[in-house]
Image: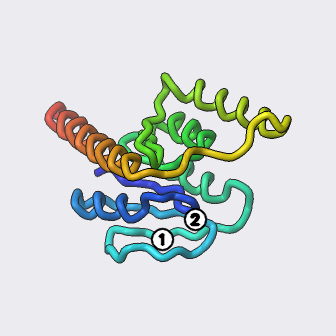
Amino acid sequence: MPEIYVDGDACPVKDEVVRVADRHGLAVHMVSNQWMRLPESPLVNRVVVSDGFDAADDWIVERAGPGDIVITADIPLAARCLEKGAQVLGPKGRDFNDENIGDALASRELASHLREMGEMGGGPAPFQKRDRSRFLHRLDEMIQALRRESARRQQEKP
């Protein structure tokens, strides 16, 4: 069974993840640097890590792997999880995969450089209702695909 790992500190779709995970009976690891209020569910594992730099990211990378789903907007974390074989979904419903992660990392670096130079301000576009809808749809699709793959592997076993 897939498990879902959530980079929880700034995740706007925590409630949605728990709702979908409950519906599918999947464990969720909500990882953050501080305690946070979450919907009650026996499937939710609240993980509070130290305030160390990348402590939450490191915890997720150490545990997530093939057949798991990681929810994060953190592009370097997404890249690390893809290397471990996990599927990665951003909170706005964007898939991160081997084909697009290089472009995402390069765009992140460029945006950071432009902000440092004062050429660009602000951050990402505000989270919208359609982002939530896209996320829910894509998360459900990922879970279904992982289940089909798991069933296929089970049938192939002698």
Q: What secondary structure is found at the residue carrying circle 1?
A: strand
The residue sitting at the right extreme is 117
Expressed as whole percent of the image width and height from the top left, the position of residue 76 reads: 63, 40
Q: Earlier in the sequence, mark 1 or mark 2?
A: 2
Colour approach in the figure: rainbow
Cβ atoms at labels 1 and 2 below 8 Å apart: yes
Residue for point 49% across, 22% down: 99
Q: What secondary structure is found at the residue carrying circle 2?
A: strand
Circle 2 crowding by C-alpha within 10 Å: few under 14, some 14–19, many from 20: many
Residue for point 49% across, 51% down: 127
Expressed as whole percent of the image width and height from the top left, the position of residue 115 reads: 78, 39
Query: Residue flagged by tag 1: what amino acid is it?
Result: Arg
Reading the image, the residue beneath label 1 is 46
Expressed as whole percent of the image width and height from the top left, the position of residue 108 reads: 66, 34
Q: Where, by quadrant of the figure, is residue 120 drawn?
A: top right
Determine whether, in the image, residue 152 is placed left or right of residue 34: left
Of 111 and 33, nearer the camera is: 111
Expressed as whole percent of the image width and height from the top left, the position of residue 28 reads: 39, 61
Query: Residue flagged by tag 2: what amino acid is it?
Result: Ser
Reading the image, the residue beneath label 2 is 32
Determine whether, in the image, residue 64 is placed left or right of residue 54: left
Of 56 and 136, nearer the camera is: 136
Residue for point 46% across, 49% down: 91
Task: Please state, as top left, top right, bottom left or bottom right, where the C terminus lies in the image.
Answer: top left
Residue for point 48% across, 56% down: 6
